């Protein structure tokens, strides 16, 4: 920092005291002046439950606003969790990108910001960058364990998995893998990201945190099954972290890995998707995954997309229409 240069302060003001024992329901208030409210604010719901010393878990949903298992699990937890159950601290933000969540969109309708590509953020940046900066500089440093619950939103659908990443620090990676196994989703994935720059995941992992993410479904909605997976997994993770007592509900999980970019298939056409494989089904290299039909005229052959490797179908495009460049399918391999 140059002489005379000051560190900018984030304008978000929490209405909760992170150091106080008990349960507090409040907001992260972000000033946002606009046409309909000159001195208005964005009010991001937050709950803090604390009792004594111990580990801190930071739990988030709604990083993308059209993914609902996280908000369901975390609004439920915030309503039910009591200080008597807790040893340490739980910070719950059910809808991290609150403007996107209110609008039921992946990215913010205010600044078109993708929260999961906006880290480390800026205290004097856009609305999305200010929220990211508050997490980067205030909330993440408090946390020992970080859980960010995702699903496929309106354009992808996944087999329900908890995920960790391959990290250069193998001891940290091992702790993350232990935490994802404790979450006990039907599938457990070592996840390859298309581009990890600016991700919340990356920000947490670079701080040395135990970080777990998920993809619990998709299609812009939740199901009874996917919501239950989220609620069970959150409690399991808190028990694993020593914050809650009791026995976790551990169920069988299928371990998956994404060994190379051959896992991904991207559409080179606009059109209508005809699936040939359903989620979770086994495929062999060169098996037909899907066809894409042109919709501008009849009589033309469909474009065929085939598997580049053996594996299972872990994700697929959603809904039925697709655009040039969209992710069509994701394969993963089962690990013994």
Image: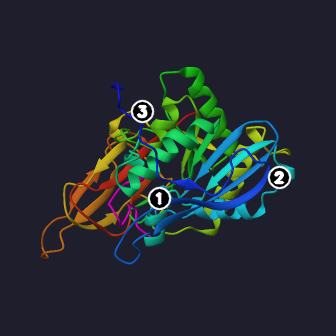
Residue occupying image coordinates x 41% and y 64%: 32
Q: CA distance from mark 1 to mark 2?
A: 27 Å
Q: Is residue 132 above or below residue 261?
A: below
Q: Residue 192's quadrant in the figure?
A: top left
Residue 282 visible? The answer is no
Determine whether the residue tagged by mark 1 lies in a helix, strand or loop: loop
| Position of residue 116 measured from the top left corner of the image (x, y, whole percent) | 42, 49
| Position of residue 294 measured from the top left corner of the image (x, y, whole percent) | 18, 69
Q: Are marks 3 and 2 in contact (CB under 8 Å)?
A: no
Please report whichever mark, 3 or 1, sits nearer to the chain's N-terminal start: 1
Residue occupying image coordinates x 68% and y 47%: 18
Residue 234 visible? The answer is yes
Residue 83, which numbered label? 2
Residue labelled with disc 1: 97
Residue occupying image coordinates x 87% and y 51%: 84
Residue labelled with disc 3: 259
Q: How is the image coloured?
A: rainbow
Residue 123, which numbered label? none
What's the magenta region? 104-115
Q: CA distance from mark 3 to mark 1?
A: 31 Å
Q: Locate residue 86 relative to residue 211 in the image: left or right.
A: right
Residue occupying image coordinates x 39% and y 50%: 129
Q: Residues within 10 Å of mark 3 (few under 14, many from 20)?
A: few
| Position of residue 83 measured from the top left corner of the image (x, y, whole percent) | 82, 52
């Amino acid at each position: 920092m140059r002489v005379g240069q000051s560190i900018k302060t984030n304008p978000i003001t929490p209405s909760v005291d992170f150091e106080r024992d008990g349960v507090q329901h409040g907001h992260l208030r972000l000033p946002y002046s606009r046409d309909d409210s000159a001195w208005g604010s964005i009010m991001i719901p937050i709950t803090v439950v604390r009792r004594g010393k111990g580990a801190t878990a930071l739990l988030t949903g709604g990083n993308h606003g059209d993914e609902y298992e996280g908000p369901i699990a975390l609004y439920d937890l915030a309503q039910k969790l009591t200080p008597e159950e807790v040893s340490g601290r739980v910070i719950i933000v059910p809808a991290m990108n609150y403007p996107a969540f209110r609008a039921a969109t992946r990215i913010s309708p205010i600044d078109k910001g993708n929260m999961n590509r906006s880290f480390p953020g800026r205290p004097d940046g856009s609305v999305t960058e200010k929220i990211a900066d508050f997490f980067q500089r205030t909330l993440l440093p408090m946390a020992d364990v970080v859980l960010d619950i995702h699903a496929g939103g309106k354009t992808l659908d996944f087999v329900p998995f908890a995920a960790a990443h391959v990290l250069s620090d193998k001891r940290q990676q091992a702790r993350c893998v232990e935490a994802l196994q404790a979450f006990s989703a039907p599938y457990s994935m070592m996840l390859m990201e298309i581009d990890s720059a600016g991700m919340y995941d990356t920000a947490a992992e670079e701080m040395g945190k135990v970080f777990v993410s998920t993809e619990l479904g998709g299609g812009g909605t939740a199901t009874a099954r996917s919501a239950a997976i989220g609620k069970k997994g959150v409690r399991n993770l808190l028990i694993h972290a020593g914050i809650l007592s009791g026995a976790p509900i551990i169920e069988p999980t299928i371990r998956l890995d994404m060994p190379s970019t051959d896992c991904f298939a991207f559409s080179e056409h606009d059109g209508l998707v005809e699936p040939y494989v359903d989620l979770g089904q086994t495929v062999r290299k060169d098996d037909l995954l899907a066809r894409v039909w042109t919709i501008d005229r009849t009589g033309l052959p469909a474009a065929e997309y085939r598997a580049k490797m053996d594996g299972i179908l872990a994700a697929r495009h959603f809904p039925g229409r697709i655009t040039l460049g969209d992710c069509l399918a994701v394969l993963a391999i089962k690990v013994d």
